[in-house]
Image (cartoon, coloured by chain):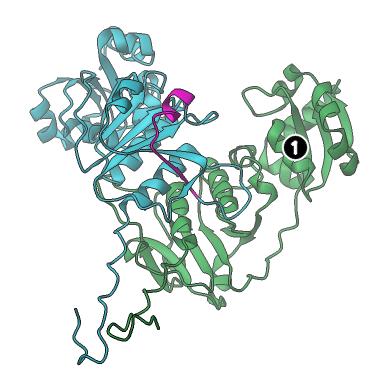
Chain colours: A cyan, B green
């Protein structure tokens, strides 16, 4: 049973300033905790029902973390979820290191995405579409916010992120920088090539900021067939990545030299 | 200033059973109220700041509804939004009539979508992709829930819906019935044709129910390039509709009869 001090400590990690001071964050619920146990994140402490601790003994042993059995009621009181009948993990943050941008791959760039639910959804979409790296402006929602972790449905364990000043990174990028605007090349026709690129998604209300817009080399747009004014930024990210990932159209059929015995060249 | 009775009446419409009894629902916030005033919905009562009422006098006159000036504080106390500095409209529901399915067009079919946020997002996506009609299982979230109306960002005024038993409708449909499953034709390759169809989206946790699955004539799937287990149903709806709406690939290039003076046939 968790001590009063443990309960208070876990609750303190609901707040960003305490997370940053401790360099720890919370992962909550059966699926997310299971994924973090199996990931390269280092788990400091695991609070779980006896059932959960027994069911995942193998994973837990690998982490060698502190264990504390807790009832669903205690987990719910300690955590941020409406209810939690499985587990909460207290996990070490990763260092914030700017990754080398992989050549021939795609990188997502988030310019001031403010809503934690949107950020979590974008992590999940990036994971679905095989995007490994996300660069976030310092003003983007904090990825360790429990709402982000929860909305990512475990995808936070598979996507790497970095927070910082986007301008110098985009200025030195050798790949094309795509940005979504109301006017731009139709994503159905744009052609995203096979050598990768950076895809910038902008703020929910204001879109891409002027400083970043100046560094965009390819303006694209999602064509609209009805009358809605806009799409949610998570939806737009998914639609663009789906277009990026489409198999390029098959090569045009070889020309047939008719009258030459049907030889196909 | 709204009377205590008005305040209580508006608050009673937070509850589904009262909405159904009164056949009225709430629309909140500047943009949504502006859209509903300009739509074919009939507004019963409008509560708004003096500024909002002055700014939209033309639209308001067309509706000939009861007006009641209210402060932002009163609007916030009456409504469901975290804050509201503009207006609340009390609006008449539309009759629940099964529409004729338009030939050569696309219809969305929602089989037990439970989350109001997802339903609102789907209305917005349908509106973006020019889908006019949504058929909902009786178990789907109530479209008049304030969370649905709010998440639709005004698109509820442009999309028509019907709630009822989906089976008889799908049984008599003359168009193909598409359904999304983990295995099915890749939406990048499927070919959606030009004669329209019905697109079934299933429950957030369980997917399409067995009874409806039996009526699906074309199984499709969104290809995955990474490791996320699934996509949110709103995201999936957008990606599929984007694939449905893509201009069909251009016809193969005309064959060139070489050695005949380059005549293109």
Q: Which residues are magenta?
A: A209-222
Residue B145 in the image, given as x and y percentages of width and height:
64, 41
Q: Position of residue B42 (x, y in %)?
A: 82, 47
Question: Residue at the location (62% across, 37% down)?
Answer: B150
Is A184 positioned to the left or the right of A61 in the image? Answer: right
**Residue A2 in picture, x, y percent from top left:** 26, 15
Above or below, B126 against A25 in this view is below
Q: Which residue extends farthest front?
A: B261
Whether residue A154 can be seen here:
no
Q: Is residue B63 magenta?
A: no
- Report the residue at 26% width, 44% height from top: A196
Residue drawn at x 63%, y 70% as measured from the top left: B101
User: Which quadrant of the rendered structure holds the C terminus of chain B?
Assistant: bottom left
Residue A214 belongs to the span the image colors magenta: yes
The residue at which mark 1 appears reads as: B34
- In depth, the one of B196 and A151 nearer the eye is B196
Q: Quadrant of residue A119?
A: top left
In the rendered view, tell whether residue A94 sits above or below residue B244. above
Residue placed most toward the observer, B243 or B200: B243
């Amino acid at each position: 049973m968790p001590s009063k001090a443990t309960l208070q400590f876990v609750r303190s990690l609901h707040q960003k300033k305490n997370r940053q001071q401790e360099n720890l964050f919370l992962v909550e619920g059966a699926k997310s905790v299971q994924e973090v146990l199996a990931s390269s994140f280092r788990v400091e402490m695991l609070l779980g029902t006896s059932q959960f601790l027994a069911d995942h003994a193998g994973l837990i042993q690998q982490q060698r973390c502190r264990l504390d059995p807790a009832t669903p009621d205690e987990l719910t009181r300690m955590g941020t979820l409406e209810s939690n009948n499985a587990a909460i993990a207290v996990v070490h943050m990763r260092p914030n290191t700017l990754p080398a941008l992989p050549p021939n791959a795609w990188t997502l760039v988030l310019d001031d995405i403010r809503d934690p639910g949107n950020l979590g959804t974008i992590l999940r979409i990036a994971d679905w579409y095989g995007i490994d790296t996300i660069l976030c402006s310092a003003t983007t929602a904090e990825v360790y916010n429990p709402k982000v972790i929860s909305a990512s449905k475990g995808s936070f364990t598979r996507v790497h992120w970095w927070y910082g000043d986007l301008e110098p990174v985009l200025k030195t990028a050798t790949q094309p920088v795509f940005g979504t605007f109301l006017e731009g090349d139709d994503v159905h026709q744009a052609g995203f090539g096979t050598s990768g690129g950076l895809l910038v998604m902008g703020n929910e209300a204001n879109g891409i900021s002027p400083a970043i817009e100046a560094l965009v080399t390819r303006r694209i747009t999602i064509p609209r067939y009805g009358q809605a004014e806009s799409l949610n930024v998570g939806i737009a990210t998914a639609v663009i990545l789906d277009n990026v990932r489409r198999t390029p159209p098959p090569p045009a059929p070889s020309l047939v030299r008719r009258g030459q015995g049907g030889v196909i060249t």
